[in-house]
Amino acid sequence: MSDDVLMQLSSNSNPSDRSKLAKLEARMVGKSSSSSPAVQSTWQMPSSVKFGTEELPDSLSSSDSEDDMCCLIQNGREFLIQANTQKRKRVIEDDHIMPLQLYEGAGDGRIKATENTEKGSSLDDSQRKKQVRGRGRQATGRGRGSKSTDQTWPSASPSTVVSSNGHLENSSVHKENWSKEHLENEEKTALKEEISLLHGKVALLEEELRKLRQGAVDHQQLCHQLEKELRDFKDRDQQMKAKRIKILSDLLISVSKSERQEARMKMRQESLRLGNVGVIRAGTVISETWEDGQALKDIHTHLKSLLESKEAIEKHRKSLKKRQSDKGDGSDAETGMSEEDFLIQDEIYKSRLASIKREEESALRERDRYELEKARHIREMKRIRDEDASRFNNFQILNHRYALLNLLGKGGFSEVYKAFDLVEFRYVACKLHSLNAQWSEEKKQSYMRHAIREYNIHKTLVHPHIVRLWDYFEIDHNTFCTVLEYCSGKDLDAVLKAVPVLPEKEARIIIVQIFQGLVYLNKRTPKIIHYDLKPGNVLFDEVGVAKMTDFGLSKIVEDDVGTQGMELTSQGAGTYWKHAGISAFSYFMLLHITNKQSEAEQYLSFEQGICPQNALISTRLHSYRQSWMFGLLA
Ligand SMILES: Nc1ncnc2c1ncn2[C@@H]1O[C@H](COP(=O)(O)OP(=O)(O)OP(=O)(O)O)[C@@H](O)[C@H]1O
């Protein structure tokens, strides 16, 4: 430590002092070799310190010259040494103050750095961080810094100045202790400040927590309230839903009831106009017979009178012709009519006959129209009668969902009701399949198999020209229901029966739609054969889109089964698909357009030749032929 300080001190002394010192030392070394090394070393150190001129003997201070020195040496070498030794002592005594004064000039930074370095070894990392934090605060001028800068280090130098001097060492230790204490105090102050800050933060957080807890409690209460409201709302909604459904079904029922009344009233009126079913009693046998209504009676009477008139005129004409030929070239003996008069009379008869013919044609057209109306009327009568006889005619709600309204029609084994779906809020057609209680279990099973197959095939079909099957459920042991898309238009059978000849354009667009449906059935996997395509199974929706329905006889075509391995019915089905599927339908439509019965008959025999083994199809075709081909085209 002393070497460093000495170096420092010597570097700080001015050059003239240094040369004087060198000279003095040179003399001392040369002339007083007896002086102790301790003294010498002690001497050397303060010699580099700036000597105040007042500290030297006047003779030395007043004269720097070589002569003075020589004089001193000559006059008493001993004195000089003694004087220098005393001075050196004094310098050393004061020395513990001087170097620090010098250091103070050099700046606090270095001392502090030294202190910090020393302290750094004894402080752990956290303490160091705190110091840095403390200094940071000093730099920002937050209290502690100002204190620290106000404090001045004691001007005492560290123990490096004179290590051999006990007093100085104590001072150094004291300073170290002081700086430690100071640091500890600073640390404590910082920690106290930090603790008070943390206390503040804790108080804030506690306040925040309290508020949050309060908020949570409020939220929970709100949540409970909302849950309760939701429950109430759901209950109310449930009650309202039940009410809504009740009101809706009541409305639907009242509309249906009025429709029923209207239908029956219309039927009664139409019965008077178009005809009714009368009862004929022959002994004990009671049979039903058709009695034409007034309009038909009138038209028939009119036609009859026209015919009578025509016959009468024809008769008169014949007698005129006879008289004309009898009279020869002369005039008629009885009437005196000339040849010219005969010709005029004949023209009158001819004209009258032509007029009657026109009237007759008109009356026949009118009769045809009445006949069509009569057919519709008979159909409606049958529907009403079936509705009245049905066990589902009292507006039941099936499966808690389908409100049955009015009967649409009755098939071989089923009744189709218009219904309202109270879940989806749409009209549907409920097809109620009833098994005859008289049937054997085997027959029932067979029917069920057919119905389930129909359902399974039909439910997978989604196409604009195929009636959708929405649902299927059992009603009781002998009855089940399929829910179908509702088609509010007529079926094609009714359309064809309503016109004597269907215009080609209309027939073509119906065929196109049905072909699209058939193409879909043939392209999907697995392919489906409808097997029962007829006008009665083509329905129209409210905008006139044609849709195929009734998949009761349809079959799935297994892809991997070759024609050889197929059942007889399936072989027929494959062929039927080609010929009776697309061709038959278009053929029938074309026949209906061209109205050529011979071609229709030819086609039917051809079709029967394709699948003679399929009794069911043959039966169907037979009824088909009966109801449609011969009924219409004959
Ligand atoms: N989805 C529907 N929408 C509207 N009316 C329908 C619907 N399905 C059937 N109908 C009508 O219900 C009546 C009876 O239909 P159903 O299919 O039971 O009889 P069918 O085909 O004449 O007889 P079968 O099934 O014995 O051949 C028909 O007049 C038909 O117009």
Image (tube, rainbow, N blue to C red):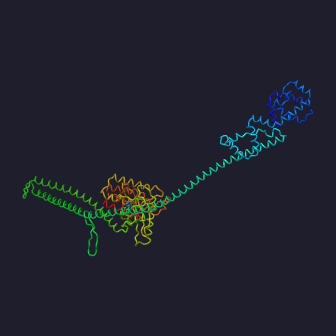
630 sits to left or right of 231:
left
Residue 79 location, quadrant: top right
Check the picture and name the quadrant holding the N terminus: top right
Residue at image coords 84%, 40%: 165
- Left or right of residue 538, residue 109 in this image: right
| 99 relative to 497, above or below | above
Q: Can you tell which quarter of the image residue 476 is in? A: bottom left
Q: Tally the numbered discs.
A: 0
Q: Quadrant of ligand 1?
A: bottom left
Residue, x 40% and y 65% (percent of image)?
397
In the picture shown, does residue 400 fall above or below 50?
A: below
Nearest to the observer: residue 499 or residue 229:
229
Quadrant where the image shows the C terminus: bottom left
Residue at image point 66% right, 40% down: 141
Instruction: Residue 313: give x, y in percent of width and height.
Output: 15, 58
Direction from residue 32 to residue 606 in the image, left or right: left
Expressed as whole percent of the image width and height from the top left, the position of residue 352 reads 16, 55
Is residue 621 shown to the viewer in this render?
Answer: no
Residue at the outermost bottom position: 284
Residue 486 on image: x %, y %: 39, 59
Tell me residue 335's x, y (percent). Answer: 7, 57
Q: In the image shown, does 100 or 329 lie closer to the viewer?
A: 100
Note whether residue 190 is visible.
yes
Q: Quadrant of residue 416?
A: bottom left
